[in-house]
Image: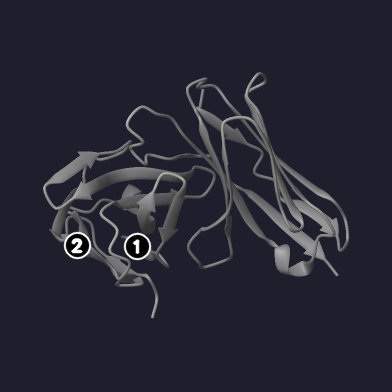
Amino acid sequence: DADVTQTPRNRITKTGKRIMLECSQTKGHDRMYWYRQDPGLGLRLIYYSFDVKDINKGEISDGYSVSRQAQAKFSLSLESAIPNQTALYFCAIGRVNEQFFGPGTRLTVL
Amino acid sequence: QKEVEQDPGPLSVPEGAIVSLNCTYSNSAFQYFMWYRQYSRKGPELLMYTYSSGNKEDGRFTAQVDKSSKYISLFIRDSQPSDSATYLCAMSAPPGNTGKLIFGQGTTLQVKP
């Protein structure tokens, strides 16, 4: 089984819709992260969490919210999706020098 | 100006060539330097990690950090078609070991048989 799983793997939605991306892990890491990847821009940090009660904004948190439901689960929400949120989204776990990434969710907002 | 700059390529080389991938950065506080490899439609996977300056070797891969020049490199010897992927540099700074990584844009490498 994969250490980090993300659901859904692909999603097409419309402008204004609320959408949730889910991440779960089996490694028992306290630290979890959400990144987005855009062509030519690399990966940018959206939110990160050190434990269930410790959630922090990253580089590009506007328009996003997160929930750490348990140590193993970290969800990313787009309250009202807009087209420029079309991107590849990755969940990651681990410490600064060793982060493990999930397979990604490809999100398209029409 | 971005904190981390990486030539996006694409870079195309023949099998067996030595490949050099590079990143420059502006934040002198960076202490942790990583290289990730990302195959198409996959998540990034950690290749190499270096703390502070110096070289690190792992098989065909060598990572170098020159903090005086704010420049890091990844060398791939005897490149193989299976090395074809996007390579991302990433960096982080203390204090607190927060785990926040700053990524370069990624360099796409193609190794032709």
Q: Using a 10 Å C-alpha cutoff, classify the residue at mark 1 as few (fewer than 14 neighbours), some (14 to 19) or many (20 or more).
A: many
Residue type, numbered disc 2: Ile
Q: Using a 10 Å C-alpha cutoff, classify the residue at mark 2 as few (fewer than 14 neighbours), some (14 to 19) or many (20 or more).
A: some
Front in this rendered view, residue A98 or B23: A98
Q: Are marks 2 and 1 in contact (CB under 8 Å)?
A: yes
A102 vs B23, left or right, is left
Q: Quadrant of residue A76?
A: bottom left
Q: Is residue B61 visible?
A: yes
Q: Is residue A62 visible?
A: no
Q: Quadrant of residue A55?
A: top left
Chain ID at mark 2: A
Q: Quadrant of residue A9?
A: bottom left
Residue at which label 1 appears: A107
- The kind of secondary structure element at disc 1 is strand
Chain ID at mark 1: A
Residue at which label 2 appears: A19
- The kind of secondary structure element at disc 2 is strand
The residue under the point 28% across, 51% down is A31
Colouring scheme, one of rainbow, by chain, secondary structure, one colour: one colour
The residue under the point 42% across, 60% down is A101
Which of the marked residues, 2 or 1, is nearer the chain's N terminus? 2
The residue under the point 29% across, 38% down is A58
Taking A73 as reference, is A48 above or below it? above
A89 vs A67, left or right, is right
The residue under the point 57% across, 66% down is B40
Residue type, numbered disc 1: Leu
Where does residue B66 sit, x and y in percent of width and height? 67, 27
Total numbered badges shown on the rendered structure? 2
Where does residue A110 sit, x and y in percent of width and height? 31, 60
A80 vs B111, left or right, is left
